[in-house]
Image: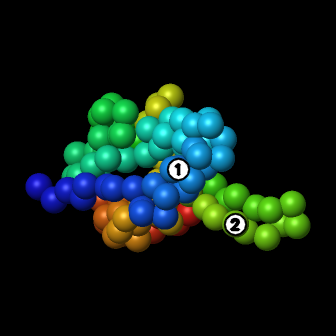
């Protein structure tokens, strides 16, 4: 069974540390909690999230691309939210190592071209 272990990108870890220094740890805690909805492992059966919860592809209910824009309306970044009932898994390709490989693997498994917002 093919699987991809997902790791945080180096720049994201650096930003967590630097943000923590300037915010007395508040930014680091906030970023860490938000990343717990991200995948730790993606395989042919489903996703193991960073919070250790397992979701299965058969339970996928919706795919939601999300675009983050600035006040001027310019796209800053994007992510893909995969909904498994009430559980949401956020795929943030630019904040994880091998982000495009993860997106391509998910596209292959689901049989549809998935993109971020």
- Within 10 Å of the Cα at label 1, are there few (<14), some (14-19), or many (20+) other Cα atoms? some
Q: Which mark is residue 76?
A: 2
27 over 65 or under it: above or below:
above
Q: Say whether disc 2 or disc 1 marks the residue closer to the N-terminus.
A: 1
Q: In the picture, which quadrant includes the C terminus?
A: bottom right
* Residue on which disc 1 sits: 16
Residue 94 left/right relative to 1? right
Q: Name which quarter of the figure residue 15 lies in.
A: bottom right
Q: Name which quarter of the figure residue 109 lies in.
A: bottom left
Q: In the picture, which quadrant includes the N terminus?
A: bottom left
Q: Nearer the viewer, residue 59 or 99?
A: 99
Q: Which mark is residue 27?
A: none
Tag in front: 2 or 1? 1
In percent of width and height, residue 65 lies at 59, 56
60 over 16 or under it: above or below:
above
Label 2: state its secondary structure: strand
75 over 37 or under it: above or below:
below
Please tell me which residue is depicted at 40% across the width and 71% down the height of the picture: 100
In percent of width and height, residue 47 lies at 31, 44
Label 1: state its secondary structure: helix
Q: Nearer the viewer, residue 22 or 15?
A: 22
Please tell me which residue is depicted at 23% across the width and 46% down the height of the picture: 45
In percent of width and height, residue 84 lies at 44, 36
């Amino acid at each position: 069974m093919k699987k991809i272990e997902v790791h945080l990108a180096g720049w994201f870890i650096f930003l967590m540390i630097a943000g923590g220094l300037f915010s007395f740890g508040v930014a680091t805690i906030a970023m860490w909690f938000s990343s717990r909805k991200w995948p730790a492992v993606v395989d042919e059966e489903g996703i193991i999230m960073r919070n250790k919860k397992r979701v299965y592809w058969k339970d996928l209910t919706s795919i939601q691309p999300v675009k983050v824009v600035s006040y001027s309306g310019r796209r800053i970044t994007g992510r893909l939210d995969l909904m498994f009932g009430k559980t949401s898994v956020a795929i943030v390709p630019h904040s994880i190592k091998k982000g495009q490989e993860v997106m391509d693997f998910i596209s292959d498994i689901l049989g549809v071209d998935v993109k971020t917002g």
